[in-house]
Amino acid sequence: MYYKIYPDVIFLTNLLLDYTVLAVSCRLCKITTTYLRLTIAAGIGAAWSVMVAVVGNEGITVLFCTYLCMPVAMLYIAGCRGGPGEWLYRYAVLMGVAVLLGGVMSQAHDRSSTVLVTMVTAVLFLQAAVPLIGYLTGYVKRKNLLYKVTLRLDGRSTDVWGLFDTGNSLTDPYSGEPVCIVEKKALAGLMQSDAFSDGITLIPYKSLGKEHGLMRLVTMDCMMVEYEGRTRQYEYPKIALYEGSLSKKGEYSMILNTASLNRK
């Protein structure tokens, strides 16, 4: 049987689909990426689709590369990093989004005989799905998810995981500024800074398993938070040092203050 193949159509169609799948997956998995990374990753996936269409899709090697090697490579180019558990989760999300979008494209194709209408449907899906999922995942993040936080002081920096806690309304009683809480042991790399020896400021609190207590207050040079797909920087944040552990399982060592993240 004879088939006529249009490589340019295959490439452009898969470029759009792969870009859509990657963009949505990165939003869902909190992968910090850029438009350029997404375009390069989608381009590689589209080029592979053209090669498979021309050469043929038979054989275990082609299937292995199509459903494992290429998705992993595309995720890596898009910016995915982490341990085996994170990779497995993000791979599952990517494949799930691909199946969902494939169903949308199939329905659009069944209801229209033209490639143009199918492509327009994909574009509309991209425009509607990505902002919607971004809003929904952003809402969930603001409720109970963790964020990677970088704290800097006197040229030194340290990374911690912070919990976005809407219940943390701690403020500096002298200035009224919002205060985030960090385990003291998590800032061991910054303890040699002069800021830790220039006097002591204490702040009262009524939480963390005690009726009341005092924590030392320190002003950092800046705090960078990976938040809703972007890294946001906050100047001179107030940090309270907690002597114990904030998380029983060690999942995080910082409690973010919602008011701190709303600062301009």
Image: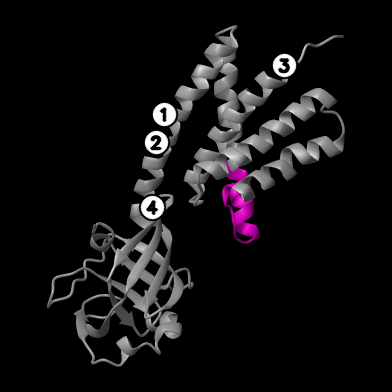
The residue under label 1 is 128
Find numbered disc 2 in the image and state the secondary structure of the residue it sits on.
helix
Q: CA distance from mark 1 to mark 4?
A: 20 Å
Q: Which residues are magenta?
A: 78-93
* 129 left or right of 233 in image: right
Q: Nearer the viewer, mark 3 or mark 2?
A: 3
Query: Alpha carbon of mark 1 to alpha carbon of mark 2: how far?
Result: 6 Å
Rendered view: 171 above or below 193? above
Quadrant where the image shows the N terminus:
top right
Q: Position of residue 113 (x, y in %)?
A: 60, 6
Examine the structure image and report whether residue 116 is included in the region drawn in magenta. Answer: no
Q: Magenta part mainly helix, strand or loop?
A: helix
Eye-nearest disc, 4 or 2: 2
For discs 3 and 1, the disc positioned in front in the rendered view: 3
Answer few, some or many: residues within 10 Å of disc 2's Cα (few below 14, many 20 plus, some between 14 and 19): few
Give the numbered dot on residue 131: 2
**Circle on res. 6:** 3
User: What's under tag 2, amino acid-wise?
Assistant: Pro
Which percent across, then down, holds residue 189?
45, 83
